[in-house]
Every structure is written in structure tokens, then in C-alpha cells.
Image: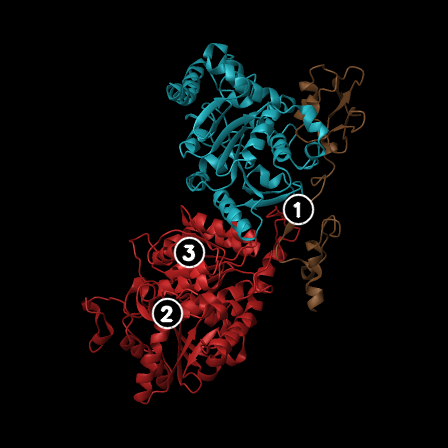
Chain colours: A cyan, B brown, C red
Amino acid sequence: MAKTKIVDIVANPETKREYFLPGNATCQGCGLDLALRWAMKALGPKTATVSPASCANVVTGLWPKSAPDWAWFNMAFAASAAAASGMKHGLIAKGKGDYNVVVWAGDGGTADIGIQGLSGAAERNEDIIYVMYDNESYMNTGIQASSSAPRGTVTTTTPYGKAKKKKNVPMIVAAHNVPYVATCAVSDPMDLYDKFKKAKDIKGFRFIQILTPCPPGWRHEAQYTIKQAQLAVDTGVFPLFEIENGILTLSGKSKRLHDPTKRKPLSEYFSKKNQGRFKLIDDKLIEQLQQDVNEWWSWIDRYLVYQENLEI
Amino acid sequence: MVEEAKKWEIIRKSREERPKIQSWTSYWDLPPASLSFPIKGCAGHTGDWRTFKPVINQDECIKCYHCYMYCPEGTVLIDDESGIVSFDYDYCKGCGICAEMCPKKCIEMQREV
Amino acid sequence: MVEPKFFEGPQKGNLAAAYAAMDANVDVITAYPITPQTTVVEELSSLVGEEEFIARNQKTQFMRMESEHSVAAGLVGASYAGARVYSATAGQGLLYMTEMIHWMVGARLPVVLSIATRGLTGGGWNIWADYGDIMGLRDSGIMIQLLGTHQEIYDSILMGFNISEHPDVMLPLFPAYGGFVLSHTSKPVKRVPWEEAQKFVIPKRDEWEHVWIDSERPMMTGALIMPQSFYAEFRIKAHEAQLKAISVIKDTMAEFEKRFGRSYGNGLVEPYKADDADVLMIGYGTIAKQAEDAVDVLREQGYKAGALRVRTYRPFPTEDILKYIKKTQIVGVMDRAIAFGNPTAGPLSTDIMAACQRYDSTRNAKILPFIGGLGGRDVTYDDQIEQFKILFDLKEKGEAPKKPYKMWGTYWTGLITGSDKVPQGEEEYFGDI
């Protein structure tokens, strides 16, 4: 599938219009804001979103005003995957099975408290799209580490730096052998758009992880949101890929980053100068982080090696 | 009394017929549970948050629309006819991503006066 | 027309519940096993593929969830879409779904969820009848009905949708019955013929009045509401709906009786020889049903005893209970649940005492709290005769008798107190250790 171009988006009134309305309560330079904006351009208005407790429950508006120009259901923290499953079945019962049902959950609501529901819905291959917008901590409650925060991250509950590595959620979901798993980052909105577009037309459980930098939480200036996501991709910290029916393809800039020598050095991303949350990162931690990144890629390698053998 | 109690049902009507913003004055008029309606600027005129505002140099602009693409808020406007880029200053929060990501560097962040 | 596999005859309580949900033509069922509820969802998983229902083109969707929290969340999601939903749980499972139960109330979703009550755990597992699980949710805003017979399980679930989905109510309804005592025993149960059930059960609606999914009418629910905004008012709305449900429950019971010839009092309370009684025992569930036997025995002995079974606990049928207390003035209240640290340790007895305080005619009634049958322990009708005798003692001597198992003003029926503390002549009050 050829990559959609921005001119195509602008030329089509259906994609040019904004579904996540401007003037919402997201911070300056919010990654979630950008991700949701582009996801909805792909999904369109026939969508019902279920969103567990997260920034997305608050920035979408205080009662009685809201920013999403489509059906949006705020949900209890651990409940979104199950509620979305039920909603899809309810819609089918009411003759509205053509609606996309989308979970819009943060990393805490996915990797931590929501993972049971996520796994259950994935195992049942529910016909929903589960989106994990990953800003790598509990930002809404004031920046507490989640299991999706990288090693060394300073948050209000890890003042000496997080001691454990980041949880690999896409691979956990992929282990359920669902039809579609993808990662994307706000650094490439068109890639994000295309992945949602593709996901929309697939039946069954679809999972998309989006890296969404958070200026107040990551402690960088608002204008660098895109650059932070770019750097995470370029250093190999956050590989972009799709797994369709068990076959993994690297996408976007990550395609050529399978070769570690082509990646930017980790110290460009994990540095005090780059992001305030990495203020405690030293050389020893960089070594450990390199190990974490290698482990992350080893999962991709397993796919690629296996796929090579498939072709023989 | 029944009609009084069903006053709230106006919110069930079509998008055009229902009120743009719900405004309730008492317990007795309220619907059984809360629901919100979409509106631009649900958090107010977020343009007031800005310290710096984006200003575009139209002569240099190549209409690549990276500013439109990267704007988190959706406040970069593109004229349907001419394709010229402008900003929705009512809601632009002034994050500066457009200026940062502009390949021609023709968007400047100017201090609000 | 396919002959139903079961229509009338001895049936387990749990299976009666499953048939009732199918006969109410539910759209979505979410399921997770927990003793003693498990056979409800087991049966449902099989009924959705049963010829009888397939022949009718009934499209009930059965969702096998991965936890009770997800069972309740699934119901919330399906109900948001406007579907008729049902599930069942018990004990710990009910506790685990508590968060979503409060959500159903706040979002005003008409869920019917039946409970095979069981003892709660911590000190030790217990899976037998004890209403501590459902009583823990008495102030959550759900409607609670406490059932006494197998037939009542079937009938209450069928009636449940008419109450829960009534536009004036729109609250979840939890019919609860004792685990094992009703769930796993069999007694005659009669189903309502399909066509008649469809005529009785409230017609389905395209969407609920206050929430919908429509791309032309976008909306959001569950937004943050500031303290100065209408949060408190929305909460009070749910209380108002509880009070409105009182007449809806009565009307539904009357309509059910008219059509099918069965009734359970007025739907709120079921009196038994209570009108001319000298003393009255109020209770709920199977124990209260059994109290009717005790009343009969006592009446034969010349004691004018009466019983009142509270069938609907939330909304609290204040008027209907006080009507009988006003007449008798000497009242026992039997709880099969413990509310730790509350004034009487019994949820129902405390509620009744509080309600009595509001009216001159009941303010001076003498009310004795009883608690027994916890964790499925048997309460025999001999025990209940004993309880009545305590009430008659109070009536004749003007004073509640001392008993070794009376502590802190509450009679702990069936309490094991140990032989060394048995006062002379009162051995019969103790369990044999």
C-alpha cells in the first residue's frame, strides 16, 4: 500500500476536517492530541471510542462540553477492553455493527491496570481496535512511572530513576496471534494514518501502539514533541513495525534500522539535555539501556529469522 | 408535570435541533445522567495560552503542509481554493511545533504583545 | 415449532435463572464462572445454541469474559449501545465487579444481574448462602431483590427487565438468592410460554433515552464534573429513580399476577399471617420463607405469630414494612449477613430501626435484631420458633430475655458458645459442639 500523502488528505474534505476539535484541554505540544487527531481522520465519524481513565478522559472536556466530534465513552481504568468488547456486541445486536469500536488507552491503562482486559479481548479476537497511546508514565495524575516507562526515567514515584526496563506490550499482544499489531509514532502522522486506515478494514482484534511524547512529563519544550518521537525511532528505542497475521514488517524509518550501526547513538535520546526525565542517566545506565534496546529488537529478529525460513 | 420532567429530552434531537451547549438551571430539568456535546473550544479560547504566536512568511511557503500535519491541535488552516496556510489564532496554543518542523523555516514564533 | 427441552418440572435455581434470561430475549450475556453461580452461565452457553431458541431466530450473544470486572464492564459497554444485557455472579466475583456496578448506577444503565449469594472470604473460603456479598452493595444505587423460591428466581428475572428498563427507573437490578440452598437444589419451576413472555416483557428500544451511539448525534459520557457544576444533582437523580422504582415494582408485580397468576406479595414485601399477628418476624431469602412454617407451628400452639419477607431491599419499602410494624409493635429482624461495626450488626435491622424513627406510630416499636445462617449454616425452623418465643417473651414481660448468644443487643442465632459458659437450664439454645 502506497503511503498516503499530505496533499491527498488536504484534498479530501472528509480527511481535511478535524474530528478532535481544536480548543480542547491538551497541553501545548501534546502528543496525544496529534495522535488522536490523525487516528480519527483515518477512522471517520462512524466510530465509538471507549477510553479508560487517562489524560484522554480530561482533556476531552469538562461537562457539558466535549472535544471529540464522535461518540466517546469515558471508562473505568481497568475496564476499557471489556467495555469495548461488550459495546461491539451491543452494537451488532442493535443493527449498528458497522461502527468501529476503538479503545483509546494510555500506557498505564494498557500495560498495567488494563492488561487483563486487553489480553482477554485479544484472546477472544474481539472485533475492536485497541490503541495504546504511550507517553511512558501516568501523566494525568502527575507523572508517575508505569511499567511502560523506560529504565532510568525520573518520575514522581521513581525519584532515583526507574530501576526496571520498559514492558514490551506489542509483543505481548502479538503472542495472542491477533490479525493486526502495529507500532507508530507521532513523528510520522501519515504512517499513523495509514496504519489506522489499514486496521479499520481488518476484522478481529487490532492493536496499535503510538509513541506520544508529553512535554510536561518528559520535561522537554513543547516545540520538540515531534523531534523527540523522531529521535526515539532513529535511535532504535522505538521500532516501527506491523505484524499482520503473524508476519512482521518494519515500517517507516525503522526499515533500515535493523542494522544497529545505522541507528543514532542512544546518548542523543537518553540525555539530561534532551529530556529532563533522563537527568540521572549516566554511562552505566546507557549500557543497560542499550541492552534493553537490543532485547527489544531481538523480538523483531525472531520474527524476521522465522519468516526467512518460511520462504525457504 | 410529566412534560416538565421531560424537558431535558431536547438533547436527544438531531445535531441541528439540539442546543449547541447544554445549559441547565435546576435539578428538575436535568437528564438522568450527564452527557456532553462536542464544541470547538471546549476548554475555552485556548489561544490565550500563547506566549509566542506563529507567523508565516507566505513568500517562502512551498505549501508542503508539514505545519498542518504536525499541528497537534488542528489549528493550521488551509484555504480550500488557494491552498494558502493560515492559523486559527483563537485556539492555537502556541506550542511552536509548526515553526520547528517547517522545512523552509518560514514560520516564525513571535512574542505576543 | 420446536418443543422446549424444559418447560415445567423440578429445576435447579440456577437453571431457572438461565431460562428466564433467555425468555426475556436478552441481547448480550457476559459470563465468568464462580461458585455457586457457575451453572447459570454454563446453562446459558448451551441455551444460546439450543434448537428452541435458534428456531425462534433469537440472537443472544454469549461473551466468555476473563474476569468479573470484565463481565460487568462488558455489560456496561453493551448497555451503552442500547442492548438488553444479563449476567450472574456471586461473592468474591461481585466484589471484583464493584467498580463497574457503581458505574452502571451513575451511567443509569438497566442491567439485570443475578446473584447466588455466598460468604465472603479473608479468614477462610466460604461458598454457601450468606447475603454479606450483596449487602455490601446496598448503598451503591442498585436495586436489590432477595428471593425465596426457585420459581421466584425465574419470575423475578423476567420481571426484572420491566423494572430496570422502565424509563422512570433506568437502574441495574440484582435479584439475589441463597447459594446452594436455591442455586443447586431443585423444586418445581414453570416457565412462561415464549409468546406470552414476549408480550409481558418491556419492548426493546433502539437506544436509551439518555445515551446513544449515532455518528449524526455525537456525544460523550462520563466527563469530569466540577463540584460547583451538577455532579451532586446527577447523584440525587439516581436516588430519585430508586424511589420511583417502588411503584414500578408494584405495578410490574400486579401485571405479572394478572397474566400468570403468581405473585410475591406486592413485589416489595410478602406478608404471612402478619395482619393479626402479636409479634412479627421480618427477614429475607429462604430463611424468611421458612419462617412461614414456624408461624404455622406456633399458631397451632396458640401463639399469634406473623412473618414478613422483605423481597425488595433496595429501593427500601419503608411504607410497606412500617405498615406491619405499626400493627404489631413487637418485631424481630433476622439478617443472614453481617454489617461489621454497624449499630445492630445486621443491615436490615439497622435500616428498619432507622425507618421506624421517622414516624410517631412506629417510633416506640420494640425491635430485636437477630443474625444467623452466616456462611450457609443451617437455620432450622426450630431455631426460628425459638426466635419467635423470644419475641413473645418480650411482649409478655416487657423485656428482651437474656440469652448466652445475645451480645451487644443482637441475638446471634446458632452461635457456638462453648459448654463451660452454658447457664443452667438454657442448654437448648446452643449448638452441639
On the image, which quarter does residue A252 sit in? top right
Identify the amino acid type marked 3: Val
Residue located beneath label 1 in the image? C218
Picture quarter with the C terminus of chain C: bottom left
Q: Residue at x 45, y 36 (%)?
A: A112
Using the image as rendered, state which of residue C186 and residue B34 is in the foreground.
C186
Q: Determine which residue is flagged by label 3.
A: C48
In this rendering, position of residue C137 left or right of residue C231: left
Mark 3 vs 1: CB contact within 8 A: no
Number of other residues with Cα within 10 Å of mark 1, as a class: few under 14, some 14 to 19, many 20 or more: many
Residue C305 vs residue C70, the one in the foreground: C70
User: Of tags 3 and 1, which is closer to the observer?
Assistant: 3
Q: Farthest residue in the bottom direction?
A: C302
Foreground residue among A165 and B16? B16
Residue B82 horizontal/vertical position (percent): 81, 25
Residue C150 has which mark? 2
Are labels 3 and 2 on one chain?
Answer: yes
Give the mark nearer the N terminus: 3 vs 2. 3
* Left/right of residue A166 with respect to residue C381 in the rendered view: right
For mark 3, give the secondary structure. Answer: loop
> Which kind of residue does numbered mark 1 sit on?
Pro
Q: Residue B93 carries which label?
A: none
Closer to viewer: mark 3 or mark 2: 3
**Label 1 vs label 2: CA separation?**
44 Å
- For label 2, count other residues whose C-alpha is less than 10 Å away and answer few (under 14), some (14-19) or many (20+): many
* Observer able to see residue A268: yes
Give the chain letter at badge 3: C
Q: Position of residue A132 (x, y in %)?
A: 52, 34
Q: Which chain is indicated by disc 1?
A: C
Mark nearer the N terminus (3 vs 1): 3
Circles 3 and 1 on the same subunit: yes
